[in-house]
Amino acid sequence: MGNQPDENGFYGSFGGAYVPEILYKCVTDLQQAYLPIIESESFKKEYHQLLKDYVGRPSPLYHARRMSEKYGCRLYLKREDLNHTGAHKINNTIGQILMARQMGKTRVIAETGAGQHGVATATVCALMGMQCEIFMGATDVERQHVNVERMRMLGATVHPVTTGNMTLSDACSQAIRDWCSHPQDTFYIVGSTMGPHPYPDIVARMQSVISEEIKWQLQEQVGRDYPDYLVACVGGGSNAAGTIYHYIEDERVGIYLAEAGGHGIDTDYTAATMHCGTEGIIHGSRTLVMQTDDGQIKEAFTISAGLDYPGIGPMHAQLARSGRTNILAINDDEAIYAGYELTRMEGIIPAIESAHAVAALAKMKFEPDDVVVLTVSGRGDKDVETFLKNKALAGEYGEF
Ligand SMILES: *Cc1c(COP(=O)(O)O)cnc(C)c1O
C-alpha cells in the first residue's frame, strides 16, 4: 500500500466516512471537489506562493552536528518549527482555506488541542477575511492560555467545550456537532490526518510539501535524495504523514514514528493508540481507538496536549499494521529529557510533541554513515513552563 486511499477513502480496512445523515451531502461534495481543486493550476500557484511568502517555506534542513556525534549518525532536522505560527499546522490550513473559498463557504470551524491548529486556522481566516469559530476543550483552554489569546486577537471566537474530559477528542465531537447545524455555509478545517474521507487524504497532501522539500534538500546536502531513516512524532499523524509521504514506497528508507506513551503503555495514563488501541470508529473514521471492551472511548493521557488523542489517522493505522512503519511509545519523562537535550546541544527549544520524536533516537541503532531526518514539528515557546515544571522527570537520564 502507498500513500493513497481507495475511492471510498480506505487504507486497507481503515478509513472511510462514517458521518451522520445530515453531513452526507457536505462530505460527498468535498469528496468530489477536493482533487480537482488541489490539482488545478490556480490552486497550486496560490498555495505555493503563500507557503513561500507567508509561511516562510522551504523550511531549512539543518545538519545537527553535536547531536549527530552523540547518536553516531548524520542527523538532519527538518525545521517545521520555523514556519509562521510555529508549527507544521499552517501548511494544511493554508490549503484548506483556499479550498473553502473555492467552494463558496463563508464560515470556518476547527477543533484544537494544544491550540496550534486553532491558531493556524484563525491566522488563515484573518488572512482571507473569513468568520472563524474554534472548539477547544475547557481543560486545554486553561493549560494553553497564550494560544487562546492569540486566536482571540486574530478575530476568532473560541468556544470552550465542557463535555467529556474537556480535551481534544471532545473538541472534535463538538466541531462535528456544529457542522451538522450549519452544513451549507460552513467549512470544517480538520487539523490532522483524521476524520471522515477525504480529510486524511487532504491533510496528508497538504503536509506532503515536507517530504517534497526533504528530497531536494538531501540531494543538495548529502548527494542523494533519500535518508536511511525518517523520524517524526504522531498525534493524529499529519506531520508524520508529510515527512514520509514521498518515501512510503521506498524500501531503502526506514520509518520510526513516536507516539505519546504518557506514564507508560502498561498504565491507564497513555496516549499510545497504536500500541494500546483496537479497531473502532472515531470522528468519522474506522481506525485504531483506545476504548473499553464495550466500546467506550478512553481518555488519552500525555504531558503533550498536541498528542492527546485516543485515535490515530487511518493511513498510520494501516502502515503500522503492514509493518512499513515502526512505532515507538515515548513516555513523558523521556520527552522532557529529549527536549532539554536538543535545547542544550543545538540551541533549539522544540515543542513537547516534537521532543517525543527526538527521544526516539535513543531507542534506535545507527551506523556512522546513516542519514537520519527528524522532523521538528513545532517550536517550544508554548511549552517552556511544562519543561521547567517537569525538569525533575528528566533527572534519571542525566543532568541539565
Ligand atoms: C498538533 C501538533 C502535533 C501533532 O499533530 P500531528 O497531526 O500528529 O502532526 C505535533 N507537533 C506539533 C508541534 C503540533 O502542534
Image (tube, rainbow, N blue to C red):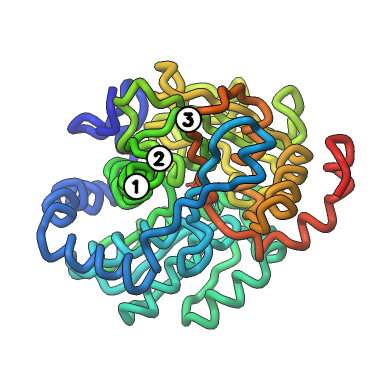
Relative to 369, is 157 above or below? Answer: below
Instruction: Quadrant for residue 281, please give it.
Output: top left
Q: Report whether residue 37 is seen.
A: yes
Task: Name the disc covering residue 229, or none.
Answer: 3
Residue at figure coordinates x 27%, y 44% from the top left: 198
Relative to 69, is 162 above or below? Answer: below
Q: State yes or no: Cβ of the residue under disc 2 lies below 8 Å from any atom of ligand 1.
A: no
Q: Earlier in the sequence, mark 2 or mark 3?
A: 2
Q: Are marks 1 and 3 in contact (CB under 8 Å)?
A: no
Q: Nearer the viewer, residue 362 or 357?
A: 362
Q: State yes or no: Cβ of the residue under disc 3 lies below 8 Å from any atom of ligand 1.
A: no
Residue 77 point in image, percent of width and height: 52, 47
Mark 1 vs mark 3, CA separation in Å: 17 Å
Q: Nearer the viewer, residue 388 or 156?
A: 388
Mark 1 neighbour density, 10 Å: few (under 14) some (14–19) many (20 or more): few
Q: Nearer the viewer, residue 296 or 222?
A: 222
Indicate the amino acid at tag 1. Glu
Q: On the image, numbered disc 2 is attached to which residue?
A: 222
Mark 3 neighbour density, 10 Å: few (under 14) some (14–19) many (20 or more): some
Q: Secondary structure at mark 1?
A: helix
Considering every residue shown, the one lying at the far top of the view is 322
Q: Secondary structure at mark 2?
A: helix
Location of the N terminus (image quadrant): top left
Q: Earlier in the sequence, mark 1 or mark 3?
A: 1
Relative to 313, is 228 above or below? Answer: above
Mark 2 vs mark 1, CA separation in Å: 6 Å
Indicate the amino acid at tag 2. Val
Q: On the image, numbered disc 1 is attached to which residue?
A: 220
Residue 119 point in image, percent of width and height: 50, 68
